Amino acid sequence: MSLSAKQKRTVYGAGGLSFDWAFRTILCLAVLFVKPVDAQSPTNIFSPAATPAHSIFGVAMLVLGVTLFIFLVVAGLLFYALIRYRNRPGDSNREPAQIYGSNQIELSWTVIPILIVVMLFLSTTRVILETQAIPKPDNAMNVTVIGHQFWWEYRYPQLGVVTANELHIPLSDPAHPTPTYLTMSSADVSHSFWVPRLAGKMDVIPNKINTMWIDPQHPGLYLGQCAQYCGTQHAKMLLRVYAQTPADFAVWVNQQRQLAVRDFTGNVKAAEGQTVFMHNACINCHTVAGTVANGRFGPDLTHMASRDTIASGAIQNTPENLRAWIDNPNSMKPGSLMPAMHLNDQDLDLITAYLTQLR
């Protein structure tokens, strides 16, 4: 029995929609594959800037190559089946012969994926082991990284420097490598240190020390993110790594070694702000070197004004933002563990004037 004209229009129309949908899908995927990646992005994994990131990039390209090949094979077979066995005028409506069971096919789609997964597993393992096996040179820079909810603490034991949220490291010359080794632990919950252009992720865990190393060869700012959910403000626990030339890094270290500014001659508001700061609960959580403020629960503020951001990279460090942050941190970073101090407007202005002088 032949199909009616209406049935034919329905079948062929549905088939046309299917072909159109499939074509549009493949076209969109192709655009995604060929679209050039923005090499200027500070978090672009396809623009590695350190040896560990280059190794990861190689594995990523291998995985993308294998998955692209699988996609092309599957899509090719799908299109072949769609075109070769499409409904044609005059085709009978009988169900085609059904074949149940094929040892060859079942072995193929079982063994081949297993081999692919094993190959990718071994390739990834090799990169991890090779990265960890590289001996630490004597001239390596050592930094202790401590994760907090929701900020980062950085200690330079060789240099006597303590800072927060913005990690400064020297460049590594490929001819004379000077990598930076990060010794990590957490003060509260599990975190994860991840700067995509420099290295892979490393868990930062309470009561456990993990170590990783980075060796950027080009100066600049590299951004990252805590990659392990650690609480309400996990998304705004950002990372900022400044790779500097040896000369610039030495200047930064010399500045950070200085005690906090204490001479506010000609700046009455800053001088009064220091008095207000030292007589409030601020000193219980924050340290300002050279003063009675020696708290350890919050970031070290000795040179806070020299940083580009506050709130772990989430907010630009401007007097206006700083004042709003001191007034009510949760209005800018909900879930922040820093309490609102409920200061009056005059005290807010004075403390802001003081903190903006701590360079």
Image: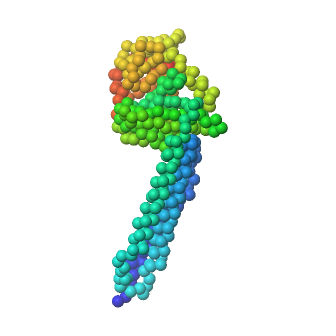
Does residue 305 show up? no
Give the percent coordinates (x, y) of residue 313. Answer: 47, 33
Which residue is rendered at x = 41% and y = 85% of the image?
Answer: 91
| Position above or below: 193 against 251 | below
Which residue is rendered at x = 55% and y = 38% of the image?
Answer: 135
In the picture, the quarter occupied by the N terminus is bottom left
Which quadrant of the view contains residue 17? bottom left
Q: Which residue of the protein is positioned furthest toward the right in this rendering?
A: 175
Which quadrant of the view contains residue 228? top left
Q: Is 170 situated left or right of 279 in this image? A: right
Which residue is rendered at x = 37% and y = 79% of the image?
Answer: 99
Q: Which residue of the protein is positioned furthest toward the top in this rendering?
A: 265
Comparing 216 with 335, the one in front is 216
Give the percent coordinates (x, y) of residue 100. Answer: 35, 77
Which residue is rendered at x = 57% and y = 41% of the image?
Answer: 50
Give the percent coordinates (x, y) of residue 319. Answer: 48, 25
Q: Is 50 situated left or right of 315 in this image? A: right
Does residue 102 show up? yes
Comparing 128 with 144, the one in front is 128
Q: How many marks?
A: 0
Comparing 65 with 301, the one in front is 65
Give the percent coordinates (x, y) of residue 207. Answer: 37, 33
Comparing 59 with 270, the one in front is 59
